[in-house]
Amino acid sequence: MFSLFYGLWKYMFSKMEFHVLILGIDKAGKTTMLEKLKAQYSNLEGLPPDRIVPTVGLNIGRVEVSNTKLVFWDLGGQLGLRSIWEKYYEEAHAVIYVVDAACPSRFEDSKSALDKVLRHEDLQGAPLLILANKQDREQAVSIDELAQYLGLKTLDERVYAFKAVSAFDGLGIKESVNWLVDAMERSKRTETLRLRAGSSVFRTDIVYIPPHLPCIVVRKSRVNLMLYDELVPEMHHMVETFLGLENGIMLLIRTSPLKAIH
């Protein structure tokens, strides 16, 4: 009985998890951004900028925002490393693209890399957050000026935002992440990834829920044994609602002596 209530509680109150790519050409400040972001949401000191080295491969950062878990994949931006970006596209809920707003000489390279990212079919429908970084520097251009360089008018069909931030002092980071969380929660891509994850884990079984028979609720890799008739009548409705909320969640009935239905 406890396992049932725990399973239902876990489902209804567990935190959504999103995977977010942090992309951009080298020296844009991606890893510094990730460290500052982790510090702001965890109240723990991240690596100071002078100890951060260029990323070769992947950095992973995790934070919690309200009832949401965010997993950030910070990928190296050197020219020779950009070919690995696409290996992470399929499972990403959204993209953060970081631009060094204080280095106009590299705007063209940044625009070219961004265009290639947005053309990839595996990122179709992914919300995009473009960050004009290094606003703490005097030579940083405004977001309006940078938007002209990047040609953002072509993004009208994609959910996106363009924010001025500083990975050095934290300017605008929380506001930007809060926007992204809201965008992912509303995104059709989130629903698509959720359904894909469900269909890849579970078989399609025809099941029914007669009373007085042992049964199990299966969600992801968690299995809880219970008896359906142990539930109070009010909980019967909750279980049926619970089963219908998410594709890939099935109540499987086992008959005595607990032989699985195939």
Image: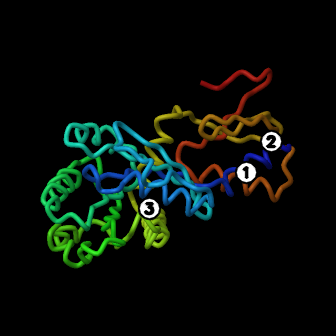
**On the image, which quarter does residue 86 sit in?**
top left
Dot 2 crowding, Cα within 10 Å, few <14, some 14–19, many 20+: few
In the picture of the structure, the residue carrying the numbered disc 1 is 8
The residue closer to the viewer here, 207 or 230, is 230
- For the N terminus, the image quarter is top right
Q: Secondary structure at mark 1?
A: helix
Q: Secondary structure at mark 3?
A: helix
**On the image, which quarter does residue 40 sit in?**
bottom right
Q: Can you give x and y, in whole percent of width and height, for residue 253 in the image?
A: 70, 34
Q: Can you give x and y, in whole percent of width and height, for residue 50 in the image?
A: 42, 52
In the picture of the structure, the residue carrying the numbered disc 2 is 3
- Say above or below: 51 vs 153: above
At x 36%, y 54%, the residue is 30
**Mark earlier in primary sequence (3, 2):** 2
The residue closer to the viewer here, 182 or 222, is 182
Amino acid type of the residue tagged 2 in the rendering? Ser
Question: Is 105 situated left or right of 165 in this image?
Answer: left
- Say above or below: 76 vs 153: above
